[in-house]
Image (cartoon, rainbow, N blue to C red):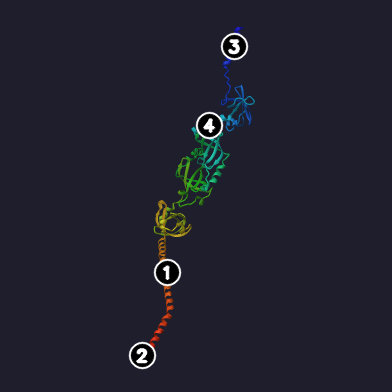
């Protein structure tokens, strides 16, 4: 009997030692089996010993593995309270979810993998993007071409309006900067686009001609979509052989255009429309000669000279030094846009697409101007002298007229005295 009691006591001690059940502590992560799940709360069985509940903001539905739970699913949760009002463990998916989200972001950065982010706000610099309630930033420069805000004139308010239109949308991005300590994350949509475009771009080589549709027009050129959603840029200098002030003067969005590929830099494609057109400068030397005087239309007046159109394809420059202006003359006062003047050709460089001009009547005009400036003071001096001479003559005449009666009277007195003397002399005889 005594031996039996000792044996039972030994078994009880062994069972007690084998009991590894721990009292969970706040902050620990535990595993549990879903007993019940709804949009309001999820109940978990912890090791068949304790019950836990996840509710409210701690549900963290942003992470897929926490979003669609059903009874029987095994899931991890963090303890935020050892006992609630019902004697249950108060649990959180959010804390575990954020840790897992950061881990996934670090892995995505390492593997250059893509993740999906939700756009929650925008400013002029880019888009505020959220990954599992972790905020990051998607700069404008890292947007894919189709989402880049190409606004003619660079109107900042219109750019912001375009960026605001993305709020609520999901973008596929890569992580290019990650600093968990500073909570700083930079995303890139452009990298994802580049990866997708590479197989399509491999089909194209420099020198190939393509036909596409203009998707955007800016001050510096036009963007063209061709092939399998490939986009290229035709710079303003590559649109035509002649000088262009604004691409919008020649094209509009959705216009079809042919161009030649002149450069491929990664996913950046640069095109030239003028390469497919005959170079009019090849015949410029035959059409125009140095010394030839031709009519030209002033296209633009700049502080350094005039841009002049000789014909639809050949434009030249009349430098300010070739206009013989005086130091006080203002080029903007003497010349106007669309004004037609005669110009003399002073140089032709077909290879450099340059033609120098000078105003054909500049020398005579300047000479005439200078003569007029010289003659005006001389003429004024002569007029002044003539006026002074006339005035002096009039004064003299007036003076003489005033003194004339006195002289007549004096002459009469002298005659009378002479006559009296003659009478006296006669009597004496």
Mark carried by residue 44: none
Tag 3 secondary structure: helix
Seen from the viewer's position, the closer of residues 220 and 287 is 220
Quick check: can you spot residue 310?
no
Mark carried by residue 102: 4
Where residue 278 sits in the image (x, y, percent)? 45, 51
- Residue extending farthest to the front is 428
Q: Residues within 10 Å of mark 4 (few under 14, many from 20)?
A: some
Q: Which residue is mark 2?
A: 425
Q: Does label 2 or label 1 sit earlier along the sequence?
A: 1
Q: Quadrant of the C terminus?
A: bottom left
Label 2, label 4: how far apart the Cα atoms are: 155 Å
Foreground mark, 4 or 1, reads 1
Q: Does label 3 or label 1 sit earlier along the sequence?
A: 3
Tag 2 secondary structure: helix
Label 3, label 2: how far apart the Cα atoms are: 202 Å
Q: Is residue 81 left or right of residue 228?
A: right
Q: Does label 4 or label 3 sit earlier along the sequence?
A: 3
Q: Does label 3 or label 2 sit earlier along the sequence?
A: 3
Q: Does label 4 or label 1 sit earlier along the sequence?
A: 4
Q: Which residue is mark 3?
A: 9
Tag 4 secondary structure: helix
Foreground mark, 3 or 2, reads 2
Q: Which residue is mark 1?
A: 384
């Amino acid at each position: 009997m005594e031996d039996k009691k000792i044996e039972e006591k030994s078994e009880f001690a062994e069972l007690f030692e084998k009991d590894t059940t721990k009292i969970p502590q706040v902050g620990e992560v535990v595993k549990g089996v879903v007993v019940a799940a709804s949009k309001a709360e999820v109940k978990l069985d912890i090791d068949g010993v304790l019950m836990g509940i996840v509710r409210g903001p701690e549900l963290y539905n942003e992470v897929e593995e926490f979003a669609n739970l059903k009874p029987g699913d095994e899931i991890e949760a963090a303890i935020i309270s050892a006992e609630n009002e019902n004697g249950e463990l108060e649990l959180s998916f959010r804390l575990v979810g954020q840790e897992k989200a950061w881990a996934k972001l670090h892995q995505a950065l390492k593997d250059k993998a893509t993740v999906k982010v939700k756009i929650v706000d925008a400013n002029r610099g880019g888009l505020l993007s959220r990954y599992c309630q972790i905020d990051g930033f998607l700069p404008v420069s890292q947007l894919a071409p189709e989402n880049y805000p190409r606004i003619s004139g660079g109107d900042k308010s219109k750019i912001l309006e375009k960026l605001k239109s993305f709020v609520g949308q999901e973008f596929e991005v890569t992580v290019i900067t990650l600093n968990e300590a500073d909570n700083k994350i930079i995303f890139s949509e452009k990298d994802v686009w580049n990866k997708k475009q590479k197989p399509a771009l491999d089909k194209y080589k420099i020198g190939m001609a393509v036909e596409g549709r203009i998707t955007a027009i800016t001050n510096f050129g036009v963007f063209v979509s061709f092939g399998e959603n490939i986009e290229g840029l035709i710079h303003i200098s590559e649109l035509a052989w002649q000088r262009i002030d604004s691409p919008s003067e020649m094209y509009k969005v959705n216009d079809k255009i042919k161009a030649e590929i002149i450069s491929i830099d990664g996913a950046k494609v640069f095109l030239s429309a003028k390469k497919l057109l005959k170079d009019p400068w090849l015949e410029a030397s035959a059409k125009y000669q140095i010394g030839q005087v031709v009519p030209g239309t002033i296209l633009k007046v700049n502080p350094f000279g005039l841009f002049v159109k000789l014909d639809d394809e050949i434009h030249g420059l009349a430098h300010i030094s070739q206009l013989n202006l005086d130091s006080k003359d203002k080029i903007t006062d003497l010349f106007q846009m669309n004004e037609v003047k005669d110009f003399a050709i002073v140089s032709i460089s077909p290879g450099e697409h340059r033609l120098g001009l000078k105003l054909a009547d500049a020398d005579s005009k300047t000479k005439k101007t200078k003569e007029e400036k010289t003659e005006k003071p001389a003429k004024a001096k002569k007029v002044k002298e003539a006026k002074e001479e006339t005035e002096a003559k009039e004064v003299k005449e007036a003076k003489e007229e005033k003194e004339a009666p006195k002289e007549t009277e004096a002459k009469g007195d002298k005659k009378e005295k002479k006559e009296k003397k003659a009478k006296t002399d006669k009597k004496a005889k």
